[in-house]
Image (tube, rainbow, N blue to C red):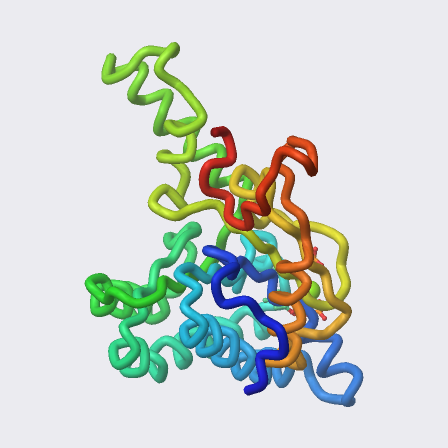
Amino acid sequence: MNLKGLDKGRLPGHVAIIMDGNGRWARLRGKGRIEGHRRGRASVRAVVEMSRKLGIPYLSLYAFSTENWLRPKDEVHALMGLLEHYLTVEQPKMMRHGIRLLAIGDRSRLPVPVLQTLEHAVEATQHNKGMTVLLALSYSGRDDIVRMVQRIARKVKEGVCAVEDIKEEMVSAHMETKSIPDPDLLIRTSGEMRISNFFLWQIPYTELYITPALWPDFREAEYLEALLEFQRRRRRFGRTDEQIAQPLRSVGRNR
Ligand code: IPE
Ligand code: IPE
Ligand code: MG
């Protein structure tokens, strides 16, 4: 595709996406919500493929929140089925393209076949050296923080570390995203101006990009637009314009 003006040297190191608007996409077409979810998979393929081709090392996809368990049973069931199918079908492609799959979220709530397929895909791709796709499934930003507190509290209780040892880096290292840099760009489709319990700790200086496009319509051209907008932003990390030499990635935020 024509990458009109995209600077390959200043791409985000980590893109996170709240993939929203499948239901509205379907309703606009007089179809059931599940058809929207089905169409959404092609957008997932498009962003994974484009991120890989551009050399973006990390892509996080918010696929299902803990609150989404409250949806009607048949919709949850269909979403789980689509997820299982996606993982099965895409695994050979992930192997071919060196994509490593990681998953975060409360796995204990996933139906057994989905869990097995997920674990299989994560294990099969663990040594792949290309990009990392992080799937947030049954994920909640607050849950992630609560579990981090529990892990650290346990270590303090066991005498592995002292209260004074608790620093920002240690907190990050005990989140589910422990080995992954903070997102540089967070995209939300469908125009909603909220985080909906996605990453909370991980996005202190992440650039937010909210587009009215519904997720099934978010393809290469829309993704390119988000990346171009990211490159137009001036990330100051609290400093003044004069002090910064355009650092576009989160790395070195405190230095
Ligand atoms: C996003 O689309 C998919 C999930 C949250 C699983 P929605 O299903 O939330 O679509 P809208 O927001 O109802 O349009
Ligand atoms: C956020 O979308 C969750 C995912 C995209 C997985 P929702 O549709 O669940 O968010 P709300 O309910 O509109 O905030
Ligand atoms: Mg929604």
Residue shown at the point (48%, 77%) measured from the top left: 50
Q: Quadrant of ligand 3?
A: bottom right
Query: Does 250 sit above or below residue 71?
Result: above
Towards the viewer: 24 or 207 = 207
Towards the viewer: 207 or 41 = 207
Q: Image quadrant for the N terminus?
A: bottom right
> Image quadrant of residue 29?
bottom right
> Image quadrant of residue 223?
bottom right
Residue shown at the point (42%, 59%) measured from the top left: 58
Left-right relation of 130 to 49: left
| Rendered location of residue 226, percent (x, y) | 65, 66
Left-right relation of 157 to 248: left
| Rendered location of residue 189, percent (x, y) | 68, 66
Left-right relation of 210 to 183: right
Total count of labels: 0
Residue shown at the point (51%, 44%) measured from the top left: 250
Towards the viewer: 237 or 205 = 237
Residue shown at the point (68%, 53%) measured from the top left: 233
